Amino acid sequence: MIGRYKFEIGCILVLALAFLATQAEFNRFYYFAGFAILQYVMIATAWNILGGYGGYINFGTAGFLGVGSYVAIGLIEWGDAAIVWQVVAAAVVAGLLGLFIGYFTLRLKGVYFAIATLALAIVLETIVNNWDFVGGAAGISILPPRKPELLGILIVDRKGDGIFSNSKEFLFFLMAAMAIFSVWVARTVERGKLGRGLNAIKDNEEAAECMGVPTLRLKLIATTLSGALMGAAGGIFPSYMTFVDPPTAFNLEFAVNSLAMPMIGGTFTWLGPVVGAVLLGTVQQIAIVTISSELNLLILGVLLVIFVTVAPHGIVGWFMKKNK
Amino acid sequence: MIRILANRMRIWLVAGLVVSSVVLSGSFINAAQAQKGPIKVGFSMALTGALAGGGKQALEAMKIWRDDINAKGGMLGRQVDLVYYDDQTNPKNVPGIYAKLLDVDKVDFIVSGYGTNLIAPAMPVAIDREVVFMGLFGMNNNKKWKYEKYFQILPAGPDPAVGFSSNWFEAIKSFKPKTIALVAADAEFARNLKEGAVTNAKRMGLEIVYNKNYPPKTADFTPIVRAVNAKKPDIFYIASYPNGSAGIVRALAEVGSDAKAIGGGMVGLQFAGIMAGLGPNLNGILNYDFYVPEPTMAIYPGSSELIKRYQEKVKTEGLKTDALGYYLVPWAYAYVDILGQAVNAVGKIDHDAIAEYIHKTKFTTVVGDVEFGDNGEWTESRTIVVQYQGIKNNDLGQFAKPGTRKIMLPEDIKTGDVQPFNALR
């Protein structure tokens, strides 16, 4: 019985570890950097549902993430909504956007699909640039509430009366919970009918269709799921950054990272994006502290070239001898 | 053979990744555990990107201040160290840099980078940590927050958005204008500035015939200038950042304009490189400034000497930065100097006490006496209005002499009379 739920128990243990880490009161920068790494775990995992299992290369990650961010900002500006509602609303809106975009673009394949998703991010950025309510092109600063409460429980309080002593610890824990949930979703997809169907689409869409795989329906579910998870990751982003402008929220760096991390980790399994995101995210955060923030993309580019050439199935594939 | 080589390559690759991660992690931990030493002042600065022209000269001025204060015994008897990172004129980088400064570098004080757009993303960090935050040329950054520990050095008065352009609108009264067109970069600083200009225009009873923002990445400004010209305004007010300012001046040279006064809030036209590059195309532009090499600028006696020291430093050290330094050097020196004076006066690192002291004190600095109001802005406006006149070529030397940027207002330091834009073209 326990063996059947080994993965779920592991998830709960990792979440408990994340919670303990917040109670250890490390240097606050570790939570700041840890958040960025966990956010990439979530984004890379979300990307992999469509890109890794289904073989549809999505360059519009920044679009979904940006929509999530701006839904959260809209809710903050409209009525100081709690962060949980920001994340839920961001996931719902980005999921619906995924469904909508999926319906119109999934008839495209290969490079045409990639270009269409890239265009999505640009179109959305242009809309936000001209939407003054959420700050327009000038951007907007957000100050997370000093003493946020949820269901009457004090979440953050500097004097120690809350569960967490500062907002960075709380955001780190929330991001950890969301990242773990996204990995659980990806694993469930991978091992279920949906994952097998998407793999069939990846191998040969026409053959899959002939064998009775409902390709359009599966792809729509994948775009919706992938979009919702990316949107949720975006929903928490404004509270973490405290300043968001369109070039930040719709940054192409998100698209490049979300694609490179599964590629480096391995796209055929849920573990690949996690390994890729933890490795690359950590190296990037270390580079920010020690060398220069400019070096981030250089590291990414070099590793991507190396892995695509030497280990096309990524690190996980390498250890599973999949590259032979 | 090939398989053996491939296997060895894999092993070396994994080993390389592990070793680099360990080495880098080691530096990460060392950086995070930085020990107490000198008093550290941390900031982000635009050393690359659109505002680098200002950021680099600000940094050099701050280094001069650091050397000066260290020669006098430092802060609280400890030497002062500047810890800074390049924000690349990108607001996205700023929150991370300040988190790093406060948590990894363990700086004692933070001050802002150059410019409103780079101060805005740092404000929530300073507020969250409840630390004193000195701003360098921020336009109304505290309007939303009303943070009591924020102070900034832009001399635009207690209502900066309006105070910044009030002298400019005073200067154009001689043209008896009836209509105005306003254009601004879609960015925090320019939008705030245009908002103030609209207030001043309405006070003067001007009819606004054009009022639009342009995306900060705009490259070709001729369509914008043509659209403004189609409205035939008497006055053309522009709030722009360096790239936009240079682009608009070039577009004006190409398309022309019948407006009697053009300019207002064009950042970047004060930078040596941009002035030399645009040369005679600047003639007629009526713009804001804070310090120009006119004989009446003796109101800031300390500034002249500081600027000479800066110019000497640029020459002797061969620095690739603004050769003149009129625009930012005195102000960048002053904003950290005020912090230094306050810390030494309070006698301890107590941000509440330091903020309280700054609020109630009149500071004597290289930019004269400075007092801050409740919102951390200057209690009086000292923005000057200059008109570019008699520029003959692209020689930088002419901008170091009096006559190319004559002061139109304030009256007590006036060195020329405002003329219609086309009369100087």
Image: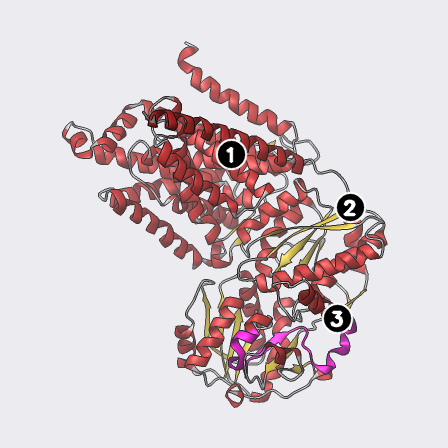
What x and y, as percent, mark residue B395?
57, 79
Residue sitting nearer the eye, A237 or A274? A274
Residue sitting nearer the eye, B53 or B201? B53
> In this picture, is A107 found above or below B87?
above
Residue sitting nearer the eye, A68 or A107? A107
Question: Pointer 3: what residue?
Answer: B303
Q: Contact (CB < 8 A) between labels 2 and 1? A: no
Question: Pointer 2: what residue?
Answer: B38
Q: Mark yes or no: residue B158 visible.
A: no
> In this picture, is B411 found above or below B146?
below
What x and y, as percent, mark residue A10?
48, 19
* Residue A310 badge: none
Q: Nearer the viewer, mark 2 or mark 1?
A: 2
Q: Amino acid at mark 2?
A: Pro
Indicate the quadrant where residue B228 lies: bottom left
Toward the left, the furthest residue is A210
The quarter in which the N terminus of chain A is drawn is top left
* Residue A175 badge: 1
Label 3 neighbourhood size at 10 Å, few (<14), some (14-19), many (20+)?
Answer: many
Reply yes or no: does residue B276 show up in magenta. Answer: yes
What x and y, as percent, mark residue A109?
24, 42
| Mark 3 secondary-structure assignment | helix
Residue at mark 1 to residue at mark 3: CA–CA distance: 50 Å
Q: Chain of mark 3?
A: B
> In the figure, is residue B423 to the left or right of A99?
right
Q: Nearer the viewer, mark 1 or mark 3?
A: 3
Q: Chain of mark 1?
A: A
Residue at mark 2 to residue at mark 1: CA–CA distance: 36 Å
